Image (cartoon, rainbow, N blue to C red):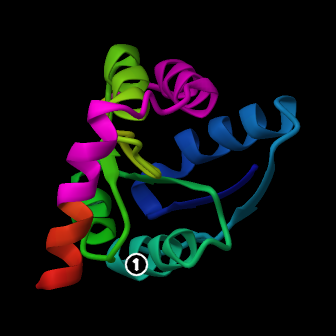
Amino acid sequence: MKVIISADHAGMTIRNEVKNLLEEMNIEFEDTGCTCETSVDYPDYALPAAERVASGEFDAGILICGTGIGMSIAANKVKGIRCALVHDVYSAKLTRQHNDSNMIAMGERVIGPGLAREIAKVWLETAFDGGRHANRIGKISKYETEH
Ligand code: RB5
């Protein structure tokens, strides 16, 4: 598995925590910023990361900003991306099982690094259930293709 991780200036602590987790899990990853010496614009980080997941270069992507909301809104503009805004472990599990999410976004002004690590771990370890859920994902993909 290859994971891309990206954060704006408001997500540095969680980004570092998740990078530690990825190293511990022996998961290959690329950190695409930011250097965060100044304030940056989250779409400049979410959109390129989402495109690299959508292209198949990466299997999964993790985005962090202040609330996670801006990152998730931007990532979900990219065709093929299902980015879930997640701030609890239950949703992290269910969004893999039911939504086959290929990205998650978290907000560092909402949760702490310990919970973010648990969320990322569960999300990375949980498989898609398929079945009736695949039908539903198919409807989203069909809409994307037709519009
Ligand atoms: C930056 O101040 C903040 O707006 C950003 O990190 C994010 O929370 C946007 O959704």
Frontmost residue, 64 versus 126 = 126
Q: Residues within 10 Å of mark 1 (few under 14, many from 20)?
A: some
- Amino acid carrying label 1: it is Leu
Extent of the magenta region: 111-139
**70 sits to left or right of 143:** right
| Residue at the spot 55% in from the left edge and 51% down from the top edge | 12
Task: Identify the residue position indicated by label 1 in the image.
Answer: 47
| Residue at the spot 40% in from the left edge and 46% down from the top edge | 101
Quadrant of the image containing the C terminus: bottom left
**16 sits to left or right of 76:** right
Q: Residue furthest top?
A: 90
**117 sits to left or right of 90:** right
Is 63 situated above or below 143?
A: above
| Residue at the spot 52% in from the left edge and 30% down from the top edge | 123
> Is residue 32 among the parts visible in the rendering?
yes
Ligand 1 resides in the quarter of the picture at bottom left
- Can you give x and y, in whole percent of width and height, for residue 76 in the image? 27, 66
Is 142 situated above or below 98?
A: below
